Image (spheres, grey):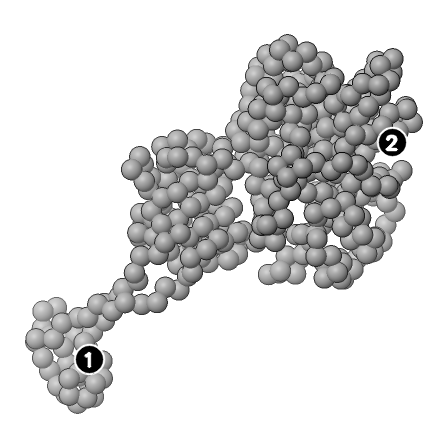
Amino acid sequence: MVKLHIGFDDTDSPNGGCTTHIAALLVEKLCNMNVSFVDYPNLVRLNPNVPWKTRGNGALCLRIECPQDSLDSIKKKVLDTVEANSDLGYSGTDPGVVFLLGDIPQQVKEFAKEAEQRIMKIDEALSLFKVVSAEAAGFKKGRGLIGGLAAIGEEMTKDYTFEIISYRIAENHGKPRQVNPQSVKFMDTKSPNTFNNVDPETGRVLITPRGPDPILCGIRGETPEAVKQAYELVLKEEPVERWMIFRTNQGTDAHLRHVSAVKDIQPYNPVVAEGQVSTQPQVIQGGHVIFFIKDDTGEVACAAYAPTGNLCKAAKKLVTGDMVKVFGGVRPPSSELQLTINLEKLMIQKLVPRTSVVNPVCPECGKRMKSMGKNQGFRCDKCGFRSSQQQKLEITQEPVVDVGLYITSPRSQRHLTKPHCRYGKEKTSSPQELMDGWHFP
């Protein structure tokens, strides 16, 4: 028996399809070919800021043990399935499949981390194939080879979550999804080891996508048992073609990389940066908030968009001089705005004193006085007292925002963003065995 890692990516398009669906098809086919799975199918989300991603920029890896003499037939089955189920007619779909035998080389692990945190070029993958003796098959431009190799290299040993995904029968693709919303809300109350099922601010159900892809619903959680039990509580009001449990880096912040200086921030990279608020936050059309932070090396804009909920409200209450840590993807400069971090999280570290200037109090009756004009003193409307000696007063106010971590609302969280409920639940080792009944059929 030999260990084989099968990585693939870039099979779908905005018109439909889903790489996880191909993984589910392959699991059924491979189970009929005398193989054993050594891990749950791995759903690896890569850099969410790449401009050409279809939806969530997810790549897949299947890790199996199989007889040596069945390798060729397995590879052919994989390639035939990927080719038959990819949207090759769409100009931006460029699938890639990667096969790697044995243990994963360190270079491939490092490549995976880079693919989560920056934009990779296909030449970087092609040169690595030769070094690690991986086999690669690309369709059209073969850009999916990058994700295929990265999915193999991401073993998710530091932290991971699970997602159970169910798929629709073909004739229902593109039609409204029939999942009972009340059952989802009930499931959410009964499933503490799942997350991001319902948006708490709007009540919107989050487990059903909105596009033409074949996914009916997906439930994320801490264990395979938790997501399966939660799935069974959801009332599906249309036929389910198949379902499967994935192990994934979703909800782990795997994409975020700390930069030591503002000058090191690059377009399209997900970053964590620290600095001092250098401008008063400005609310622009749509309720979005823009402010700048700076350090000794430079200044960068930060954007908190209205759908981020409490994060946007907190950003609005910052003042110049506050110390913050910002988390998010970097948007390249445009004609309207310079290089900008689109915020996923905001850590308020230190607040400067809030002060305001007010008119003096009347010494005769205690009522707040009014200005009589520039350099003309103050008068009291209640008792008539006037004075040119009184001065405006500076008073200290209580901050209207607290030090702490603010995370975008679940309805606008990216796949990789770690929600509040996952802090303290990070995992440190891979599962030793697979639960029974982790896929159907």
Q: Quadrant of residue 45?
A: top right
Identify the residue position indicated by label 2 in the image: 28
Left or right placement of residue 397 versus residue 419 in this view: left
Question: Counting other residues with Cα less than 10 Å from the Cα at mark 2, is it few (<14), some (14-19), or many (20 or more)?
Answer: some
For marks 2 and 1, give the CA distance: 80 Å
Question: Counting other residues with Cα less than 10 Å from the Cα at mark 1, is it few (<14), some (14-19), or many (20 or more)?
Answer: some
Nearer mark to the viewer, of 2 and 1: 2
What residue lies at 67% left-to-right and 37% top-to-bottom?
429
What residue lies at 55% left-to-right and 36% top-to-bottom?
255
What residue lies at 68% left-to-right and 25% top-to-bottom?
152
The answer to which of marks 2 and 1 sits earlier in the sequence is 2
**Residue 4, placed above or below residue 427:** above
Is there any visible trace of residue 228 in the rendered image?
Answer: yes
**Residue 214, placed above or below residue 178:** above
Is there any visible trace of residue 286 in the rendered image?
Answer: no
**Residue 366, placed above or below residue 396:** below
The picture places residue 290, in percent across and down from the top left corner, at 40, 49
The picture places residue 221, in percent across and down from the top left corner, at 70, 48
What residue lies at 80% left-to-right and 43% top-to-bottom?
166
Q: Please state, as top left, top right, bottom left or bottom right, where the C terminus lies in the image.
A: top right
The picture places residue 87, in percent across and down from the top left corner, at 74, 27
SS label for mark 1: loop
Identify the residue position indicated by label 1 in the image: 361
